[in-house]
Image: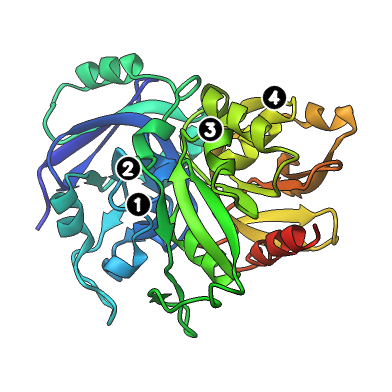
C-alpha cells in the first residue's frame, strides 16, 4: 500500500514527486547523498547529518529492518530521508521493527518513488542544495520558495543542537562477536588510560572503539573549555565528529588551541577540521561532500590505501601544510583532498573519515590503537 503524495523541491526549482512514508510533515535542509548500500539506521542516527536531507543512492532501503543495537545516538538528527523504494518488510533475524514505522514513531519525514539516480547526478553537477520534503504542501512553487529561504550550511554552528549537556562516563565496549557489550567491557581500571572525548556529535560506536582500545572514557559537552577538560587530568583527548561549518564552532577551535601541547589529541571529521583551524589553517565547503562507505584514502606514512567511511561537506585547506609545523598524512584518492594531518612538534593527529566503520569497512580501526601508542610514548 502506497502512502499519500509527497514532493521534494530544490532551491534551483527542480521538483521530484513521490509518495510519503514515515511521519507526515514538511522538513527543510541541505540535500545530500550517501553511497552506502547498507547502514541506513546508523546514517540516520549519526549527528553529523544534522540539518540535512539524506538521499540514499542504493535503490532499496529498509529491507533488513531496524534494531536498537544499530543506533548511533538517542534519535534521528537528519531532517528527512529520500529513497527510491522503502521496504515494507524486514527480512532479518536481528530486526526489531520496520523502517517506515520506526521513522513515523520518531517524527521523521520520508519520501519514496524518487529517481535517486537523477537526483544524485543533479547534486554532483550543481552541488549540495537546500531543499524541502513535504507530504502536506501541494504547491511546488511555495516549496521552492521555502527551500531558497532555508539557512545555508556555511556559517552554521550545529554542534549546540547535538552535543550533550553534561560530562558522562562511557563504559560500553564490544563482545568477541562485535556486538555492544556492557560495563564489563575493556581492560581493568588499573590498566586503562583516561581519555576525555569531546562530544561535537559523537557516535556510540566511536566510544565503543575507545573502550575496546583500553581507555577509561569520559564524554564531555562540545562547549567545554580547555581548562574544564584539563581539570579532569586526562591522559589524552579525543575530538569527535559533528555537523555544520567547522569555522563557526569558534569555541571548539579555542579549546583545541588551549589543549595543544598539554595533552595528546586525536580528532576525526569535524574534530579534524577544527584542529586544522586551531593550527592556523583554513577550511572550505566541498561541492557535494564525501558521504558513504567506499572512499579510498592513502596513508602517506605507511603507503597503504584504505577504504573508509565518510560523512562531511567541508575540508581542510591544503595551504596549512606550507607552514612547516603541520604534516599532511592522508589524501583522498578520488579528489586529492586532505584526509589527515599531524603536528610535528605536538602530540596531535587527526583524520577526516570515520575509522569506527559504522557503517562501513574496518580498514582504519587501527587508528584507535595508534592513539593509545601516542599517549604511551610520553
Mark 3 vs mark 2, CA separation in Å: 25 Å
Q: Residues within 10 Å of mark 4 (few under 14, many from 20)?
A: some
Q: Which mark is residue 225?
A: 3
Mark 2 vs mark 4, CA separation in Å: 27 Å
| Residue found 35% across the figure and 53% down from its top | 73
For marks 1 and 3 on the same chain, the one whose residue lies earlier in the sequence: 1
Mark 1 vs mark 3, CA separation in Å: 26 Å
Which one is in front, 230 or 87?
A: 230
Image quadrant holding the C terminus, namely: bottom right
Q: Which mark is residue 45?
A: 1
Mark 3 vs mark 4, CA separation in Å: 22 Å
Q: Residue furthest bottom?
A: 176
Horizontal and vertical percent position of residue 141: 23, 17
Horizontal and vertical percent position of residue 25: 14, 35
Q: Residues within 10 Å of mark 1 (few under 14, many from 20)?
A: many
Q: Residue 262 lies in what quarter of the image?
A: top right
Image quadrant holding the N terminus, namely: bottom left
Which one is in front, 303 or 372?
A: 372
Amino acid at each position: 500500500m502506497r502512502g499519500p503524495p509527497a514532493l521534494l523541491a530544490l532551491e534551483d526549482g527542480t521538483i521530484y514527486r513521490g509518495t510519503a512514508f514515515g511521519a507526515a510533515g514538511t522538513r527543510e535542509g541541505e540535500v545530500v547523498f550517501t553511497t552506502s548500500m547498507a547502514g541506513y539506521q546508523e546514517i540516520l542516527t549519526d549527528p553529523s547529518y544534522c540539518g540535512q536531507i539524506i538521499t540514499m543512492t542504493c535503490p532499496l532501503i529498509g529491507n533488513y529492518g531496524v534494531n536498537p543495537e544499530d543506533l548511533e545516538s538517542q534519535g534521528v538528527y537528519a531532517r528527512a530521508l529520500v529513497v527510491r523504494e522503502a521496504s515494507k518488510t524486514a527480512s532479518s533475524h536481528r530486526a526489531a521493527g520496520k523502517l517506515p514505522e520506526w521513522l513515523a514513531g520518531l517524527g521523521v519525514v520520508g519520501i519514496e518513488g524518487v529517481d535517486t539516480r537523477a537526483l544524485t547526478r543533479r547534486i554532483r553537477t550543481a552541488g549540495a542544495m537546500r531543499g524541502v520534503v513535504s507530504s502536506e504542501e501541494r504547491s511546488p512553487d511555495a516549496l521552492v520558495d521555502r527551500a531558497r529561504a532555508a539557512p545555508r550550511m556555511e556559517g552554521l554552528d550545529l554542534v549546540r543542537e547535538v552535543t550533550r549537556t553534561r560530562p558522562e562516563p562511557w563504559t560500553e565496549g564490544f563482545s568477541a562477536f562485535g556486538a555492544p557489550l556492557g560495563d564489563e567491557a575493556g581492560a581493568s581500571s588499573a590498566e586503562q588510560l583516561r581519555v576525555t572525548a569531546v562530544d561535537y556529535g559523537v557516535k556510540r560506536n566511536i566510544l565503543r572503539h575507545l573502550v575496546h582500545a583500553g581507555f577509561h572514557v569520559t564524554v564531555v559537552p562540545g562547549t567545554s573549555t580547555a581548562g574544564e577538560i584539563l581539570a579532569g587530568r586526562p591522559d589524552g583527548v579525543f575530538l569527535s565528529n559533528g555537523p555544520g561549518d567547522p569555522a563557526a564552532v569558534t569555541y571548539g577551535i579555542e579549546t583545541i588551541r588551549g589543549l595543544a601541547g598539554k595533552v595528546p589529541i586525536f580528532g576525526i571529521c569535524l574534530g579534524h577540521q577544527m584542529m586544522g583551524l586551531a593550527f592556523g589553517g583554513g577550511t572550505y565547503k566541498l561541492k557535494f561532500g564525501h558521504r558513504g562507505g567506499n572512499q579510498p584514502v592513502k596513508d602517506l606514512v605507511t603507503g597503504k590505501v584504505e577504504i573508509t567511511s565518510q560523512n562531511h561537506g567541508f575540508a581542510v585547506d591544503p595551504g596549512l601544510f606550507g607552514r612547516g609545523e603541520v604534516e599532511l598524512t592522508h589524501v583522498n584518492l578520488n579528489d586529492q583532498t586532505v584526509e589527515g594531518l599531524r603536528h610535528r612538534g605536538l602530540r596531535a593527529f587527526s583524520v577526516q573519515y570515520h575509522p569506527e566503520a559504522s557503517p562501513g569497512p574496518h580498514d582504519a580501526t587501527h587508528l584507535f590503537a595508534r592513539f593509545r601508542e601516542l599517549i604511551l610514548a610520553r
